[in-house]
Amino acid sequence: MNDAQDHAASIDDPAALAAEAAAAIARLTGVDRHDIGLTLGSGWGKAADVIGETVAVIPAEQVPGFHVSGVPGHSGTLRSIRLASGKHALVIGARTHFYEGRGVRAVVHGVRTAAAAGATTMILTNGAGGIDPAFRAGEPVLISDHLNLTAASPIEGANFVDLTDLYASRLRDLAREAEPALQQGVYVQLPGPHYETPAEIHYLRVIGGQIVGMSTALEAIAARQAGMEVLGLSLITNPAAGMGDPLSHEEVLAEGKAAEPRLAELLSRVVARL
Ligand code: 8IG
């Protein structure tokens, strides 16, 4: 096959598209293998500047399968970072959300690309609403498990992937060595893009949800399918609907900004232990 045929074939094959993206990343960064994949959600972006030395920044549109983000506060780049340990982290600054309507394959392409680039650890971060009143706005919380309420899966066909210990207890223990005060909670992914009604938040609390957002669960499933260990972290940017003031995207961005230095420091200490 020539390159054009190769690319045409990959459009209907997520694994081939991820392999193509990983090859482009290796070529554009000069880094053959990345050890850690990192998706930085609202509030977490500054971590990319402090966890190590940036080797290369690539515009998302130069890598097959990535799209420019439509969400203010999300960066639209891929970045290769060398950590003090000598490991390489690939920061996916171009997350596609389920609510963008590009389908689940697009949502998990970043995770699959990180795996194809060699990553064995996937760190997924997000901004989220706090359902459990113990979680205050501005605080990071470890994701202990999830409820996937998107009615979707990134896995296609009869492939029954085990999700026990999806958010690896080994990595959660490491994170709590870095920050002993870190609390943990069950993350609920809803499709969005609207926030919840107070009645929905009541329902989510009753069924065991403690944190609510619009990302991460589908990505975590894809990461596990790809054989990676997953670490999930939420920044609580707002009390969930009905538990405080009405929600606004501006509030979310402001809380994210205020928490950035602390979150960057936390992630530095966590990746140093991987
Ligand atoms: I940031 O309260 C953020 N993302 N669904 N609900 C949902 N997503 C969110 C929320 C929230 N806050």
Image (spheres, rainbow, N blue to C red):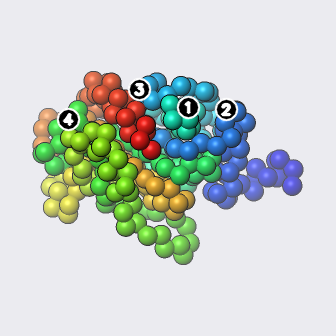
Indicate which disc, 1 or 4, sits on the residue closer to the N terminus: 1
Indicate which disc, 3 or 1, sits on the residue closer to the N terminus: 3
Left or right: 188, with 37 as reference point: left
Q: How many marks?
A: 4
Residue depicted at 40% across the width and 66% down the height = 163
Q: Are marks 3 and 1 in contact (CB under 8 Å)?
A: no
The residue under label 3 is: 46
Q: Are marks 2 and 4 in contact (CB under 8 Å)?
A: no
The CA distance from mark 1 to mark 2 is 11 Å
Q: Are marks 3 and 4 in contact (CB under 8 Å)?
A: no
The residue under label 1 is: 82
Task: Please name the amino acid that badge 4 sits on.
Answer: Ala
Indicate which disc, 2 or 4, sits on the residue closer to the N terminus: 2
Task: Please name the amino acid that badge 1 sits on.
Answer: Arg
Look at the numbered disc 1 and give the secondary structure of its residue: strand
Residue 195 in sight: no
Mark sitting on residue 29: 2
Task: Please name the amino acid that badge 2 sits on.
Answer: Thr
Look at the numbered disc 2 and give the secondary structure of its residue: helix
Look at the numbered disc 3 and give the secondary structure of its residue: loop
Mark sitting on residue 137: 4
The CA distance from mark 2 to mark 4 is 37 Å
Residue 131, percent across and down? Answer: 18, 48
The CA distance from mark 3 to mark 2 is 20 Å
Look at the numbered disc 4 and give the secondary structure of its residue: loop
Depth check, mark 2 against mark 4: the one in front is 2
The CA distance from mark 1 to mark 4 is 31 Å
